[in-house]
Image (cartoon, coloured by chain):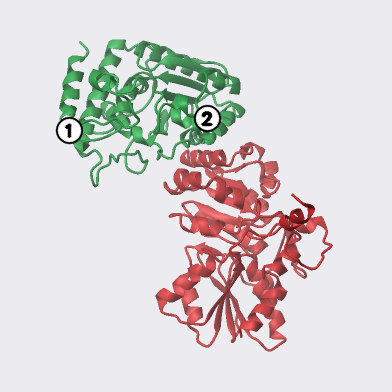
Amino acid sequence: MSIQPTTGALSNVSLEQRAWNIRRKALLMGEVQGQGYIGQALGISDVLATSYFHALDYRPEDPEWEGRDRFLLSIGHYAIALYAALMEAGILPEEELETYGMDDSRLPMSGMASYTPGMEITGGSLGQGLGIAVGMALGLKRKLNPAFVYNLMSDGELGEGSTWEAVMSAVQWKLDNLICIVDFNNQQADGPTRDALAVGAEAPKWEAFGWHAQEVDGNDLGALVAAFDAARSLAEPKPRVIICNTTMCKGVDFLEAREITHFVRVEPEEWAMALDKLEEGRPA
Amino acid sequence: MTLDSMARKYERRTRPAQKTATSAMIASLAAEGYETVSAPFGNALVEAARRDPRIVGLSADLAKYTDLHVFAQAMPDRFYQMGMAEQLLMSAASGLAREGFLPFATTYAVFAARRAYDFIAMAIAEENLPVKIACALPGLTTGYGPSHQAFEDLAIFRGLPNMVLIDPCDACDVAGMVPAMLAHDGPVYARLLRGKVPSVLTRHKPDYRFELGKAQLIRDGGDALVISSGIMTMRALDAAEALEADGIGLAVLHVPTIKPLDTETIVAEARKGGRLVITAENHSVNGGLGEAVARTLMLAGVSAPFRMIGLPDEFLEAGALPTLHDMYGLSTKRVVEQVKGWL
């Protein structure tokens, strides 16, 4: 069965539930392993819910279906979040959640294409996803395949020169089948992204390079739906970027309130507390 | 800074004054006496691409200097000019391979090995994708200095799992390696000889044909065995002819595939006792063919006397190629001298 793009037919309530389910699964995986990039996972869940339950065309039973929209996880350490989304989408069985990060698991801590159905690329060496996406978008055009390529990258990757090589190339080749999603949570390994290389407004930079750029609240499902719809339906022959300003640890208030770092420490007893806290916010 | 200290700072190694044309700095291999073939890589690729629609070509602003322009002219809609962006070149090639294409990505060996390494490692080799990387100016084939001289590319790529490495000697190897690269289901890095490329191997061994993963004995001899790759096989063959006049028998085992190495043939030849074993490579003596052969012989328990011809562990000078080949021991004359000195 193919899940058709729904272009707004799904209500925000339903997407809200999807996002909540993704958060819950990510927390359960974090609990299994006692660690994980849970801050990023909670922050990006709304973007993943919008991607997998509003925008992307795919077949859960056939993750390599030729007609699928390609979703590239450039940020390999966000794997915990994508696994949760892939389980929610029926591409991965939910039982595998118990194996997260363990020996012989298909769910390694950093995403790798050869381990996991639905994981298109081996991310983790940051700054590679967008260039690969350019190649895939060129390949799809060569095959006259109308699928989109989505590349999910982090704000930290804006510091990699290779990102900007790909930004220029996507314009050169008029890649209107390429949608880049930037998770702007303003946090990279050593501190705020704004204190490193990503200085100044982002959308104007991408626009100056020739992209169609939108900047949205990445935890506002309504705004995300509108942005994805605009990106997919744009007639202009140019690549599209959606810069999503997200809040790390979104949905678990005591973690949100914690001094946020790239790797959010969660004490052993706090995983259950976090799940309880999430439960309080379960969509009606 | 005084004029005196400035003179010292910029002093180059003293050597006999040379007046060599600038053109000799670019591509002349000083292969006197050999016929040449024009753009064997580009022409072989066009031929292969006529049969296989999955083949596409990409370059990072060096199509003209890797003979990929021949392909670009013949099949413009299958050529991607990626601009001066080697990291993008490799990741885009990876993306095209994921979509079922067989991309040939070309640039200079220095840029692939040094600048784009992480992209070749993670976007291509880690997933064993069939991206074919063909790179010009291997080793000491340009006088432009270290920015263009890839004297350590093989050392860099030998550490990379899944990667097949080819160091061709001549036009026959270059033309022959193209279908072989395609037939291999995985990534390949090939050193490229471009422009007018000498035909060497078939003159010495008329039935020679490139075979991936195979070392081939081009000539036999009783005093020393040269195990060589790339243009150093040409030097070894020329040296063998010169040494024959002095009654010295030089066998030449050509090893165009550096990885996987044909250890069986190498060990079998080296085991034929009583011969000095010499490796010869257009590459640093660190991490290339010589060390690979040394390890092979050690592991096999072959204890033949062993010498290496290769580039020294230093950044090489700029200048005219013939001068540099003499200086660094890669010219036929210097190979002859070195072999005589060791025997």
Where does residue A129 sit, x and y in percent of width and height?
46, 35
Asked whether, in this view, residue A18 is left or right of residue A124, the answer is: left
Earlier in the chain: of badge 1 and badge 2, it is: 2
Quarter assignment of residue B90: top right
- The N terminus of chain A, quarter of image: top left
Asked whether, in this view, residue A54 is left or right of residue A90, the answer is: right
Q: Amino acid at mark 1?
A: Pro
- The residues tagged by marks 1 and 2 sit, at their Cα atoms, a distance apart of 51 Å
Task: Please name whichever residue, A203 or B260, is drawn nearer the observer in this view of the structure.
Answer: A203
Tell me the green chain: A
**Residue A152 seen:** no
Q: Chain of mark 1?
A: A
The residue where tag 2 is placed is A144
Where does residue A6 sit, x and y in percent of width and height?
37, 15
Task: Please name whichever residue, B89 or A55, is drawn nearer the observer in this view of the structure.
Answer: B89
Whether residue B151 is situated above or below residue A157 in the rendered picture: below
The residue where tag 1 is placed is A268
Whether residue A190 is situated above or below residue A234 in the rendered picture: below
